[in-house]
Image (cartoon, coloured by chain):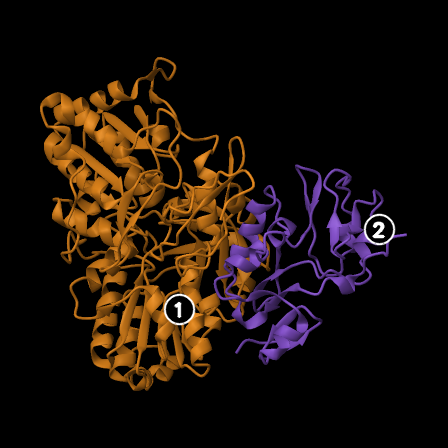
Amino acid sequence: MPVKATAAQVDRRVVLDLDRCIECKSCMAACFYGHGEMAGVQFVDIGPAVLPVVCRQCGDPACVEVCPAEAMTRDDRGVVARGLFSCHGCGSCVRACPFGVLSLEMTGHQVTKCDLCDDRLERGLEPRCVAVCPTKALRFATVDEVEVQGLTVLGGRIAGDHPIRRR
Amino acid sequence: MSSPEGSTTAETTAARCLLCSVGCPVRALRVGPDQYVPDYVPHAGYVGLCGRGSVLVEWLDHPDRLRQARRSGDGGRTLAVKDAARRMAEALRVAGSAVIVADGNLDVDTLAAVGRFARDVGARWTACVTPGDAGLVHGLDGSRAKLVGPEALAEADAMLLVGDVFAAQPVASHWIYAARDAHPRIPRLVIAGANTATAKFATAQFEPVLVDGAAAAALAAVRTGSAEGLPAEARGLAGWKEQLAAGQHPAIVVTAEGGYGEARALAEAVAALAAETGAMVCPLTAYGNAWGAMRVAAAEGGACPAEILKPGADVVLAIGCDLVSAYGAAVAGPLLDGAGDVIYVGPMPNRTSDRASLVIPAAFAFEAPGRALLGPDRLVEFGPLMQPPAGVPTVTEILALAGAPTGAPAGAIAGASTDVSAPCRAPEMPPSAAGRAGDGKGLVVALASDPVHFGDGSLTSRAAWPRAVRPRPVLALAESDAEAAGLTDGHVAVVEGPGGSAEVEVAIRPDQRAGQGWVTGAFAGVRDAFGWSWDGARPGEPVRMEVRKA
């Protein structure tokens, strides 16, 4: 019986270096055009800044738990993936996600979801959002790799010299 | 790199994005029979594409593209491009007064061909760039400042940024952050709106008041150490000249905002400060080829838009630009209404083509090889991103078709190589008579730079991503101003200016200076609301607007 994949297998994640983000939304555009005009990168307005949020590849993902169509699953890479054809677009996962990284694409009745650009990873390339980020605010890295650069990491996903304000 | 389908625009393609003067290389990847996506492989020292640049690829196979020449009347009868080009030339030649306005992002040789064609048919012509770009070029070109491209900023060890650089030219941030990586304590003064992403990068920041010459006055305060006549917080500008001068590679990065006069004064102030600090100056324009357009216009007899865009012309030819959106309905409307013939040549429909009696499809500038001048010494040759659709000619080909019947050999109009090495400071716009926003009711509202839309929005409003992420204009204003108008964050408000009203989404910015606001300028309704005219607030300049609940 195959061993079930876990979040621990996803060693590299998209990490945001908070104080390098210039809010240009290049990452969102790259994701949008690279995924059939459905962006897996969302932007949230936290008042002092508007920041990109990307799927955190949770250990115990609420989106998988609530999906009535079993469209949200953890694939064999350990990545939380959305099955394009089985997704009904009901939006349950959008409401369940505590981080607001999912959105409902109304016309296509699909939920947008980061897949870490598996088509690019297979070719040895970084996810699109990371590749286009002009300031390297988004990195495809392990927590250890980020910490080695002297940055503080919050929740495994957000990094900075000072985690809650810019330099 | 090769795609699974084996049909990218190829490694040999050196197409450039001209949606700002960074001029990023761009490639497209074919993912279906008629579908292309941007190919995000950093190359040539660049990092990829910003959101605006990504949109270029969508236009290649956009369903709205103009593909056939069409006359108004007779049910919109189509005609062959060759016949349409001849009709265009005939209309221009017989007109008592004809004007031509060409998009500034056409490549320099095509623009020069437009200039020669205008001479041949007896028309006056101008190149369309933002008024801020024109002022910036005229204020800096021929100055003694050491003008550099954004790549040189990686060496900087002291920096002054003027304007919302990160929104107007997002990829320039790549080298700016590289400088900070090399010198983590690099002093960074930002003179721009307090609510901008660029301001958050600053170690010191000053937001000029939106009145005539305020940004230039802030630069002068840096240079002289005297902040007389400026708000109290401008006292912090004193001492920055010395900080810049203390660097081994100090840099001033400037992007143009507002109208021509403001941008020109700002550019001259930058040049003066650079002369006293030894700073290199990186001028960044909204139009990638603004420098090329201004120099070609100066060399080929181009006139100032204020002379061209006035009622009285019998025939108006717009090449690739939307006059109504670019200059506002109050400026372009009377010109187009009064003309017997309006002719549009370009790749996509817009508010000008909607009013044209003859529409001729043309390729985008990036669908043919060409040259662009990204900065005074940044002449780049570029290849086509992709071939234009079948039957759609380039602008140069249309001009050649139009010129040939009257005896002007095609080669004399098209195909010549244009010298763009000479600096220019004309055709300059005469000084504004009415000043800018002046006193009165309401907020002083200026156009905000936007990393999502390009220019007047006439192109990007037809693209899927900008429509999805910025479907309506945003008005950034101070909390106290929002409270006074009974507005909260996310409310839909109405701004009412001299030219009408428009709906906007409210974004409250705690750091914003009270009494002034910034609105996304890439929306037709907003631009019309500014009511720009040649006698009052001129295109690009801030105006007073009343803000109320929708």
Disc 2 + disc 1, Cβ < 8 Å = no
- Does the rendering let one see residue B512? yes
Q: Position of residue B516 (x, y in %)?
A: 43, 63
Label 2: state its secondary structure: helix
**Which residue is located at x 32 percent, y 57 percent?**
B285
Palette colour of chain B: orange
| Residue nearest the observer in this picture, B238 or B90 | B90
> Which residue bears the numbered disc 2?
A66
Q: Position of residue B191 (x, y in %)?
A: 37, 72
- Does the rendering let one see residue B443? no
Q: Position of residue B202 (x, y in %)?
A: 44, 76
Kindly indicate which chain is depicted in purple in the rendered structure. Answer: A
Report which quarter residue B513 is drawn in: bottom left
| Residue nearest the observer in this picture, A40 or B443 | A40
Q: Position of residue A78 (x, y in %)?
A: 76, 57
Q: Chain of mark 2?
A: A
**Mark 2 against mark 1, which lies toward the viewer?**
2
> Which residue bears the numbered disc 1?
B192
A14 versus A95 height, above or below = below
In the figure, is residue B152 to the left or right of B421? right
Report which quarter residue B415 is drawn in: top left
Q: Amino acid at mark 2?
A: Val
